[in-house]
Amino acid sequence: MQVGILSEQAIRQIVDPGAVVAAVRDALVQHARGQAIMPEPSEMDLAQARGDMHVKGAYLMGAPFFSYKAASGFYDNPRRGLPVNAGLVLVFDAETGFPRAILFDNGYLTDLRTGAAGAVAADLLAVADVRQVAVLGAGVQARRQLEMLLQVRSPARVSVWARRPEQAEAYAREMTRSLGVPVTPQPSARAAMEGADVLITTTPAREPLVRAEWFEPGQHVTAVGADLPDKQELDPALFARADKVVVDSVSQAIRSGDTHHAIAGGHLAPGGIYAELGDIAAGLRPGRERDAEITIADLTGLGVQDAAMANLVAERMVAEKLGQMVEI
């Protein structure tokens, strides 16, 4: 047997944002229609090191592969001169169970699929004419979220806030230059989200960054940073104000992140979750129905999204004979 090995650099040459958004959307639809096998994720919270590890896997029925990914985020790494994220993806043949590829993506595919899920959420839940976007956080995921959002919406301007002003300023310069959309750093989270049609939160915060009373009718928020029980970005009271609360997985949201805190605090009943994102993508439930609705998409990440990314890369690797082949 031969196993293909791909580096992050090679993987970056294979995928493009449009294909990523389409693949993630399709995976969410398959999951909603019962056409996927996805075990519960495994998580490890290394709070003393400000780090966490996630292991997720899935099989999208009809695909030639199934996969497992392990991805970590250690948020003090930049002070060590290291990236925040690391990880790899193991790809297996869906007929024989033998390994077919090891993707040393260093968390890149996780970053992409998280950004793509945010784009799908905004496409289904935000107003059609998005003029202003606010981003909280200025790390890798803040970049991926904005890049992917531009696949589904065309905002005229973007505001950004980060705990370290120099990071927000660097983000604004980089994204303005690379994406061609004016990005302006703001002195506070409230200033950043004022007047925004879409708010994206991408931080590892463990207490709320935004207050419920700051929100105006018609605003949509995609929260992707709180993917563990102790993480939190949104005021739990916002969930009582929202017209629609959408999650990628009800079971995951009940035990992790912002929805978890809202339920624990009595601001949202478990039955108050409107839908899973895949249900809306599959047309089983409507998305935004009125311009004045306040909508929340609380995303913790699904194994089917990781499987979609692994399939995208592995199929290209096999078809074009890419990567280093190793006999086992």
Image (tube, rainbow, N blue to C red):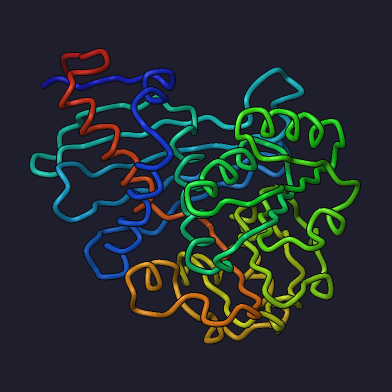
Identity of the residue furthest to the right in this view: 187
Which image quadrant for residue 235?
bottom right
Give coordinates of residue 188: x percent, y percent: 89, 51
Between 159 and 47, which is closer to the camera in this rendering? 159
Give coordinates of residue 24: x percent, y percent: 37, 51
Q: Residue at the spot x=75%, y=55% of the render?
A: 206
Q: Residue at the spot x=47%, y=75% of the render?
A: 287
Which image quadrant for residue 166?
top right
Between 31 and 227, which is closer to the camera in this rendering? 31
Give coordinates of residue 322: x percent, y percent: 24, 18
Give coordinates of residue 58: x percent, y percent: 30, 51
Where 12 sits versus 33, above or below? above
Residue 264 horizontal side relative to residue 90, left or right: right
Q: How many marks?
A: 0
Residue 149 horizontal side relative to residue 75, left or right: left
Where 132 sits versus 51, above or below? below
Where 229 sits versus 313, above or below? below
Q: Residue at the spot x=10%, y=21% of the render?
A: 1
Quadrant in which the C terminus appears: top left
Between 170 and 11, which is closer to the camera in this rendering? 170
